[in-house]
Amino acid sequence: MDIEMVSQHIKRADLLQMYYYLLLTRSLEDRITALYRQGRIVGGCYTSHGMEAIAVGYASAIERDDVIAPFHRDMGAFLIRGITPGEVLAQYLGKRTGPTKGKDGNVHMGDLKRGVLGFVSHLADNLPVATGAALAFKIRGESRVVVAGTGDGGTSRGDFHEAMNFAAVRKLPVVFFCNNNQYAYSTPQRLQMAITDVVDRAMAYGMPGEIVDGNDVAAVYLASKRAAARARAGEGPTFLEFKTMRMHGHSEHDAAKYVPHELLEEWKAKDPILKAERLLTQLGYGDEGYFQEVADRAKKEVEAGLEFADHSPLPEGREVLEGVFASEEEVQS
């Protein structure tokens, strides 16, 4: 991305913080993958490896009172909203200290107090939920925005289109994005839709759209900032297509042998962490010593989180219904 534009529109502290979250996300998901291979994870293991800039960029661009409706490639957004590595690891290990208190696994978690709507397994189901939250904000006259995304495959589902249409008609304060990692599980994009750019789908709803380099955290941040400002100003939703590449399988049980080796090699050179390091170096904000220091800090935080999760108790059977249904207080809030 243009260096001058970055230096003018993104504070140094914000860039450095995003770099930290890129490394924290990679370190945490690498640790979870290792635990999965050791047979310690309850359920599946889905990562954002090679796509970390999307979640880190958009979650950094919104305000604290805003809300996100993430999906399973958005670990960085969970972390930025305040869910700690220890809580994430407790979730994966089925412990009581995880966000679902041991009732669910992996990234099927949320926390309304931290502005995170629970992730729905069926991709794109989170978009109608986000649209409903945005409608509530508009009715209440609140200056709040919702951000929700799905993968390229999710944009071929009906619930995606219903949410886009309703949000556009009602000019709701919501930002939709597509993490276009080129594969819907094992199906390449060319076999699941007849268009090259997913962003073209926004035109059907009279909604502005933008194609963004999804491996460039600064580009994701600025595009998300613009879309959130537009939504907050009452101008309605925007659709962002973040182009990226899934560098692992759909999940860690999937070797992804259907992905051409040359394609992976091409995108390895576009790794979002390498891109961020080149940007920080050009701006004079960091060097090799600083990058190593941040990497060490991230790994230390992840290991401390694992110790917390390891020492956390499993839930008791009598707790199985706690938190399943909304309390009277939650219904009234």
Image (spheres, rainbow, N blue to C red):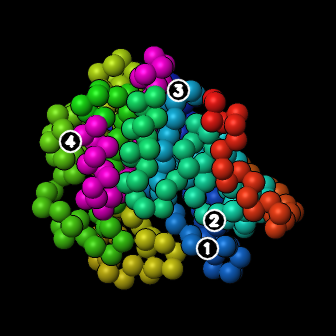
Q: Would you say the residues marked 4 and 2 are in contact, meaning their CB atoms lie under 8 Å apart?
A: no
In reply to whether residue 303 is colored magenta, the answer given is no
Give the magenta range. 137-166
Q: Which one is earlier in the sequence, the residue at label 3 or at label 1?
A: 1
Specify the quadrant that holds the N terminus. Answer: top left
Q: CB under 8 Å between callouts 4 and 3?
A: no
Residue type at the position of mark 2: Gly
Q: Which residue position is annotated with label 3?
A: 63
Q: Earlier in the sequence, mark 1 or mark 2?
A: 1
Using a 10 Å C-alpha cutoff, classify the residue at mark 4 as few (fewer than 14 neighbours), some (14 to 19) or many (20 or more): many
Which part of the image, by quadrant, shows the C terminus? top right
Q: Residues within 10 Å of mark 2 (few under 14, many from 20)?
A: many
Taking the image as shown, residue 220 lies to the left or right of residue 42, namely left
- Mark 3 belongs to which amino acid? Glu
Residue that numbered label 1 is attached to? 43
> Pointers 1 and 2 in contact (CB under 8 A)?
yes
Residue 130: where, in percent of width, then height?
Answer: 43, 40
The answer to whether mark 4 and mark 1 are in CB contact below 8 A is no
Question: Which residue occupies 33% across, 23% down?
Answer: 230
What residue is disc 4 on? 202
Residue at (58, 58) in percent of width and height: 107
Q: How far apart in space, not on screen, are marks 4 and 1 (Cα)?
A: 35 Å
Q: Residue at x 33, y 58 (%)?
A: 154
Q: Position of residue 323 (x, y in %)?
A: 71, 51
Q: Which mark is residue 105?
A: 2
Q: Earlier in the sequence, mark 4 or mark 3?
A: 3
